[in-house]
Image (cartoon, grey):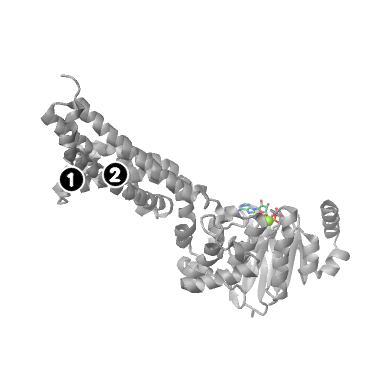
Amino acid sequence: MTEQTHFVEIRHAQKSFGTLEVLKDISLNVERGQIVGIIGSSGSGKSTLLRAINDLDPLTGGEIWLDGVQVNKTLPHRQYEKHINELRQHVGMVFQHFNLFPHMTARENVTMAPKMLKGLSQADADRLAEEQLDKVGMLERIDYYPSQLSGGQKQRVAIARALAMKPKLMLFDEATSALDPELVEEVNLVMKKLAEEHMTMIIVTHEMDFAASVCDRVLFMDKGVVVEEGPPSVLFKNPTQNRTREFLRKHIEGAS
Amino acid sequence: MGLDFSIIPKYMDIILLGVGWTVGITVAAALLSFVGGIIFAVIALYAPWLVRQPFRLIEWVFMGTPLLLQLFLIYFGLVQIGIDLPAFVAGIIGLGLHFAVYNSELIQTAILAVDKGQMEAARTLGCSRAQALRKVVIPQAVRAVIPPIGNNMIALLKDSALVSVIGVSELTLSAQRVIGKTYRPFEFYILAAAFYYVINLCMEWVQRKIERRISISR
Ligand SMILES: Nc1ncnc2c1ncn2[C@@H]1O[C@H](COP(=O)(O)OP(=O)(O)OP(=O)(O)O)[C@@H](O)[C@H]1O
Ligand SMILES: [Mg+2]
């Protein structure tokens, strides 16, 4: 076993669902404070790779390391659960469909996990909720239920909920693709703000402009492999691979 | 002998006591059936095989046999193994477990119907599966089945009359006792029916209030 030197280190990740091989030997490093975008057509394995990082979809081969700790290490079941639950507290995740808890207000959504897992008092939890919801511009709606919020507002609350655990890594799985076009920008602005604060982020997205504007590096995935990666200025302007060129041509034409 | 409702006030205290027992037993059994329904549902879905088996037996007994027999079994049968319960307690347990089994079926279906993303979101925050079930999945499942559980509770109210067979002086038995003295079955059965109807209305009112309160949080 080699020494782990990167903040996030994915080594020869392999994932199959039954006989379907979804990730084929993917290796990827992310440094602290870096923002990495993942693009690629539907079914290429973007979500699966992202979800392997916090073990929602455990790998069937390879290793994932996060800040010196192996995510998918071999442990007896109970210890593994404990290890994963502890690790997930440091990894925020934002989903395409928000997955806010509908029976809780914005405040309760944000404070549920910190209260339960970190034993915050109600007063501290309230302060935390106000701080996090303020950050995403949702302070006025702190006692609203998700059913009373627009899609963009829901996603901002979902981001606040993830941030309330003070994660050192944030994973975004198409955070804006379920939103009406006019609501995309408010969520993008929150993500940009996080970028300015040097949050380490891995962002799966269909929005090429957004990826180009916030990411330090962009990966293009196709059929379970990383076809090409590089800074957005290179990957979007001068892709070396045919598959990348084809994807970008289709995608940028399709979008405009 | 014509109808004479004027004799009702004289026996009203006995009838009202019966109403009290019926309401008390119904409320207690309803709470038991609700909490028990959640516990049974969680066991049925998540407990290890060995733990599930005794509960499957309970489920089979309470779904597959008459409630009357279940009440006899709990009240008269358990004495033989040294469990001597007061009749009203036996009645509450019998009714409560009987309807817990029905509620459990509803709650199980509702738990499975909660969007998988809910469990995932809770797990990504670091919650264990048990914590996620308790805080996120089960509260949503329960909200979703409040209307059908309400229907079960109305059925429970009506079936509470069965505990008269083990000697609890609830509303039906109280009416019968009064009729034994007065030979006025029509008047007192009508009176009992009216009280059941009123209790029924109260339960529907409570159910509507609960539904209205949770409608925003679904
Ligand atoms: N739980 C699962 N069981 C079986 N197959 C799965 C499962 N999850 C994903 N897959 C399959 O794995 C492949 C990759 O899926 P994945 O969701 O990672 O793609 P994606 O790149 O995120 O696509 P999209 O852009 O549509 O979100 C797809 O063929 C998908 O059908
Ligand atoms: Mg996806």
Q: In the image, is A65 to the left or to the right of B28?
A: right
Disc 2 to disc 1: CB gap under 8 Å: no
> Disc 2 designates what residue?
B26
Residue at (24%, 33%) from the top-left corner? B192
Outermost residue toward the front in this view: B6
Query: What chain does mark 1 sit on?
Result: B
In the image, residue A124 lies at what x, y percent? Answer: 50, 74
Viewer-nearest residue: A189 or B80: A189
Query: What chain does mark 2 sit on?
Result: B
Give the image quadrant in which the ligand numbered 2 is located. bottom right
The amino acid type found where label 1 is placed reads: Ala
Q: Nearer the viewer, mark 2 or mark 1?
A: 2
Viewer-nearest residue: A245 or B21: B21
Q: Can you tell which quarter of the image residue A210 is in? A: bottom right
- Distance in Å between CA atoms under marks 2 and 1: 14 Å
- Quarter of the figure with the N terminus of chain B: top left
> Disc 1 designates what residue?
B87
Q: In the image, is B16 to the left or to the right of B199?
A: left
Outermost residue toward the top in this view: B1
In the image, residue B32 lies at what x, y percent? Answer: 31, 50
Residues behind callouts 2 and 1 on a single chain: yes
A53 w.r.t. B198: above or below: below
> For numbered disc 1, what is the local secondary structure?
helix
Q: Can you tell which quarter of the image residue B187 is in? A: top left
Q: Could you tell which of marks 2 and 1 lies nearer the N-terminus?
A: 2
In the image, residue A87 lies at what x, y percent? Answer: 55, 71
